Image (spheres, grey):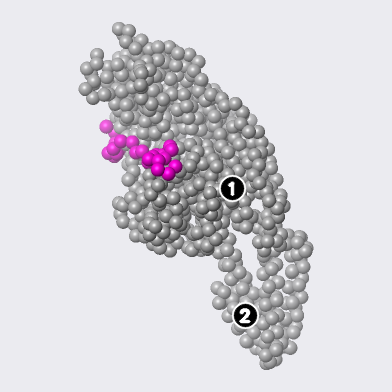
Amino acid sequence: MGLTSPGLPYLLALLAFIVLLAIILGWPWLSRRSAGRIGLRLVSLCVLQALVLGLIFVIVNNEGEFYSSWSDLLGTDASGHASIIAAGPVDAASHDLLSVTGRAPIRLPAGRPGGALEQVRIAGQLSGISIPASVYLPAAYFARGSRRDYSVLAVISDAAPGSGSPYAAGRLARSAATEIAAGRMGPLVIVMLPATVDRVDQACLNLPPTFVRRAPQRPAIQAETFFAQDFPAALESAFRVSSSPANWALLGDQTGGYCALQLALDNSYVFSVAVAPRAAYTQPPGPAAQLPGAFRQQDNLVWQLSHLPVPPVTVLFAGPGSATGPGLARPFIASAQQPMRVSAIELDSGNWPLAHVLTWVAAAVGAPAAAGQSGAAR
Amino acid sequence: MFILAAAGIVGLVWFWPRAARQRPLTMLARVGLIGVSQLLVIAAFLVFLNSYFGFYASWSQLLGSGTTAVVRVAKATGPSQTSVLVTGAEPAPVPGGSAQKVTTHIPVAAGRGITNLAGQVGGKNGLQQTGELLQVNITGEHSGIAVAKDFVYLPPQYFQPAYAHTRFPAVLALTGYPGSSWSIVSRLKLPAEQAALVQSGKARPAVLVMMNASVAMPRDTECTDVPAGLQVETFFAQDVPAAIEHAFRVQGGPGSWAALGYSTGGYCAVKLAMMNPRQFSYAVSLAGYYQALLDQTTGNLYGGSVGYQDENSPDWRLQHLPAPPVSILVTSSKVGERTYGGTLRFVSLVKPPMQVYTLYLAQGGHNFATWGRELPQTLMWLSARLSPAVPGSGTGSGGTTGPPSPGTVTGSGAG
């Protein structure tokens, strides 16, 4: 009878019951004082015990499918040789993670080179999200014998590229080019990305598909996977940028501030610096705020700071909105502890509001102004 | 326990005549006596089975009073804090020999680098032959999860002069549920099998990190980032590799880490690789399953969201998300494994650039003997893919020295 056959437990149970009955009824007969009877007591008890243990073992084994047969149990199972086989289709043509769709040089006053602004499309390998982005490459990037590990600032903003917003790609690139040319910051690669993915503000989170409002059947949009895994991989595959978190920063405006902070807190193995406007950050923007309790708790960045280990990231509060004092960001600032570091600065007035922010970020991610060049290059 | 059970039987045989009178009460007494002695033997049998299969390592793991097993460090994780603590060390088990439980306690001097502690037991010359088995506590910098009594195997080459500056590839090996990481050493015999293959030239040396897939026994956490709870996926995918790369000469580049596991550990290995292909380029699932579980032992893992549970299912991910660039080896048995059907289904869903390899035994149950038979081919498959440790190389390919900490930390506050 097989080890896993359904009749085995019943057979064992029946035998155990018969032996038990025999022991109970034969008790007086067995209780006479003779070596033979004492031996029989022992034997009968052991038989009963073996039957009961066997029964338990067979039931547990059937439940957990630990051993499939007697030979499996006894270790004599060597049934033939099996080998590893490649199943399924083996590799198709590889696709580019990042493709350049356009390119415009940045001209500074007096015709000095300010680098270039490239229009690119990033195809997220893991998330499947494909979005357009702009990449600013500093003039030094094109120099002969240029370094291989430029620091990266990722700007997350829904500001239209041609708009007057200081976060819009053109204006930001010009701002950076000016600061670099003036020697107030080192060369830095800047990438401008939208905060809204697939027409939904995902707050740069992986939203479970059933919680996207008004469209319960839509596929899961893995925005966090895109920003924290796909985007760095794509950029590193196409440009000579560093892969160390110490050289990666995030910057968000009112639309991308939650993104920047959230991504840095959750992915400190990728990013080490985040800049965002002063705000509460107790709940994400967009449909993510409708998530059930546990998600809502976790997406509250102030809750995260007090319930999870504080990551080693540097946070700067700077951006549109109230400019003086901690403002709405007070609870966040109060919860931040070592190894996190939090500071705040105000935006500049004039043509380049983000100039100071850019130089601060450059210093924080290892692209400081070259010594001796500072302020003198003009 | 066994002594108690034997005493029960002897006592019963001895006092047999006392219950020999023909009265209804003594009839009942007989049944009671037999019942007690049976229970004692059954309890002894269960204790034996538990230690044989390595289900639960302690009473607290079984009963759930083990809240101390997980230390939530919400604060004060300074960058200088050691995240790997060696609590025991001994020469690694040799092929064919039996593994002894790590007992040597090495006092950890405050402020000393962990690499100084490795290689202090058994003598340098001995370790160059056997390699070393370390018992470690690991604290996750990002997840805050702290685990104790897991094991790290450093191969003999790790101590040989030719490899003195070489970084090794690493394999994260995970148990099933319930399980104990010691059974990877003693029952699966992973270090001994790996050593035997390296000795015979069929595999190249690697560091093995052997851990309990459940970080909060008796809860079955299924390597999941629980919303507003234990971030187990983060722990295994980010914290553990970072801690190991920091504490030992282990590579950090692409192709240098693999995840391997049996049963629940197999599910974990595949999920971890699919969600973190830049960390784990390869995964091996010995009789794993490919859908996210939700049952009594797991508790609420997905924040009440079916969508999030789906995202934790390898099957669902293959159907709804792009396939990640990983190579996966799945094993099962055509007879005796209820994971066989699920494995066939998973394999049928795989599409490029993901690659899947299969190893199906004709017969074999859900146990260490079966997985042991699959292990040699599995380890050779892994070895052929992992970025090798090159003797004499200064830095090793893609090596890093752990997560860099940005700048000087001066505290917080608006400034």
Please, what secondary structure does the residue beneath circle 1 have? helix
| Quadrant into which the N terminus of chain B falls | bottom right
Q: Main secondary structure of the magenta part?
A: loop
How crowded pointer 2 is (Cα within 10 Å; few <14, some 14-19, many 20+) is rated as many
User: Whole-percent x and y of residue B125?
Assistant: 39, 57
Q: Quadrant of residue B129?
A: bottom left
Residues at marks 2 and 1 touching, judged by CB atoms closer than 8 Å: no
Query: Is residue B4 positioned above or below A355 on the image?
Result: below
Residue B356 forms part of the magenta stretch? no
Q: Which residue is mark 2?
A: B9
**Which of the chains bears the disc numbered 1?**
B
> Which amino acid, by three-letter code, is at mark 1?
Thr
User: Whole-percent x and y of residue A278?
Assistant: 36, 29
Q: Give how far apart the Cα atoms at labels 2 and 1 are.
A: 47 Å
Question: Do we see residue B219 in this rendering?
Answer: no
Q: Quadrant of residue B252?
A: top left
Q: Which residues are magenta?
A: B390-415
Residue B410 forms part of the magenta stretch? yes
Task: Decide which of A206, B373 is in the foreground and name it.
Answer: B373
**Which of the chains bears the disc numbered 2?**
B
How crowded pointer 1 is (Cα within 10 Å; few <14, some 14-19, many 20+) is rated as many
